[in-house]
Amino acid sequence: HNLFFFKKKSQRKMCKVDSQANPYDERPLVDDLLEKHAKAIASVRESILDDDECKALYGKGDNTKRYDDIWILRYVLSHKGHVKSASKAAMNTIKFREESKLNQAGDLRHRIKQHGVPDSEKMANIDPLPGYKLYNKYCEENAICTTLPDENRGIVVYYDMGKMDQHGLATGMDTEQMKEMVLYANEAMFQVVDEITRRTGRLTKVMKIVDMSSTGFRKMNRAFLQRDGASSKASEDYYPQLLACIMVINGPTWLSTFWSLLRPVIPKRVAEKVDFLPSVAKMKGNQKALKSILKYVAEENLPEKYAGLNKQWPLPCVSERYVV
């Protein structure tokens, strides 16, 4: 199951832009972004090379290909073109990746697994990512489905909050264990969307759909959500432009009050990406209401339970595409 990761020179180059984009697909063209932010990208690289430690790490192994213009671009975009903060984040990431030995982890895409979903025969003998087994202990059937409905678009992750034991996770998984689990999950997902970005020529990210229909107020655990938010902040720091948005669907009446209490402890950059959608009943067949979701997944690939046309559930795991 050893797969080739994108360390080959040919895989680091931009390919022809995908001309068959979905009409709702608003992903910007990478070449346009590189041209627009060329000066900021060059300035960030200059800052990296001005730092002795980062300069040594930048020149180590194949890191010059890893930390290329497209990699730097994500930092420039996340920091809204502010060179100083983008440079600081990029340098912190370079040092963190060296300390964590992430550059030696290899291709992790085939190790992504779903929570509460039995392995397919294809996935049965694949080792999961670190932290997966402990987290999965607190997940009921079909709790989290991580999918790639279109090989030319981004990952879509479906969360059923009522099927996640938040109280169990809050007591059974400490902060460091949570961070490790989130780190490797994000590393694997980044590898997926980075390859798609380079192959299609469009900046590709992850969308999360959070279904609140089966949960109640007493099932929510603020400590767990705060810890999850802190892990998400680290993810945003080390994997900028990985997360496109979090769509909350089927929200109960008490959700707005709960969110007002939770939002102050959630990192600002994460909170800004949360959007609350109408119920599935109101979105079904309503292209206007579905538009925010259709930016990331076609209606024929969106499950019926989330106002789409796809009758299959649960959906195949993203990793199925990367197992040989």
Image (spheres, rainbow, N blue to C red):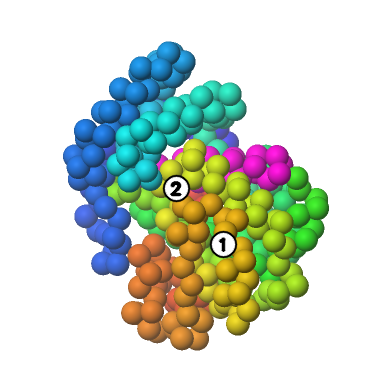
For mark 2, what is the residue? Answer: 242
Residue in the picture at 26% in, 28% down? 42
Residue in the picture at 56% in, 49% down? 232
Disc sitting over residue 263 in the figure: 1
Instruction: Please tell me in which quadrant of the rendered image residue 234 appears.
Output: top right
Residue 95 x, y percent position in the rendering = 51, 24
Compared to residue 274, the image places residue 88 above or below, namely above
Residue 156 x, y percent position in the rendering = 48, 59
Residue nearest the viewer, comparing 7 with 203: 203
The answer to whether the residue labelled 1 contacts the one labelled 2, judged by CB atoms less than 8 Å apart, is no
Residue 51 x, y percent position in the rendering = 41, 17
Residue in the picture at 45% in, 59% down? 272
Look at discs 1 and 2 and give the one toward the viewer. Answer: 1
Residue nearest the viewer, comparing 190 with 173: 173
Say what amino acid the circle numbered 1 marks. Arg
- Left or right, 280 with reference to 70: right
Q: Residues within 10 Å of mark 1 (few under 14, many from 20)?
A: some
Compared to residue 28, the image places residue 296 above or below, namely below
Using the rendered image of the protein, determine whether residue 270 is visible from the camera's viewpoint: yes
Q: Secondary structure at mark 2?
A: loop
Please give the range of residues in magenta. Answer: 175-198
Disc sitting over residue 124 in the figure: none
Q: Residues within 10 Å of mark 2 (few under 14, many from 20)?
A: many
Instruction: Please tell me in which quadrant of the rendered image residue 181 appears.
Output: top right
Compared to residue 320, the image places residue 46 above or below, namely above
Residue 190 among those drawn in magenta = yes
Residue in the picture at 40% in, 72% down? 300
Secondary structure character of the magenta stretch overall: helix
Along the polypeptide, which appears first: circle 1 or circle 2?
2
- Left or right, 322 with reference to 139: left
Residue 270 x, y percent position in the rendering = 50, 54
Q: CA distance from mark 1 to mark 2?
A: 20 Å
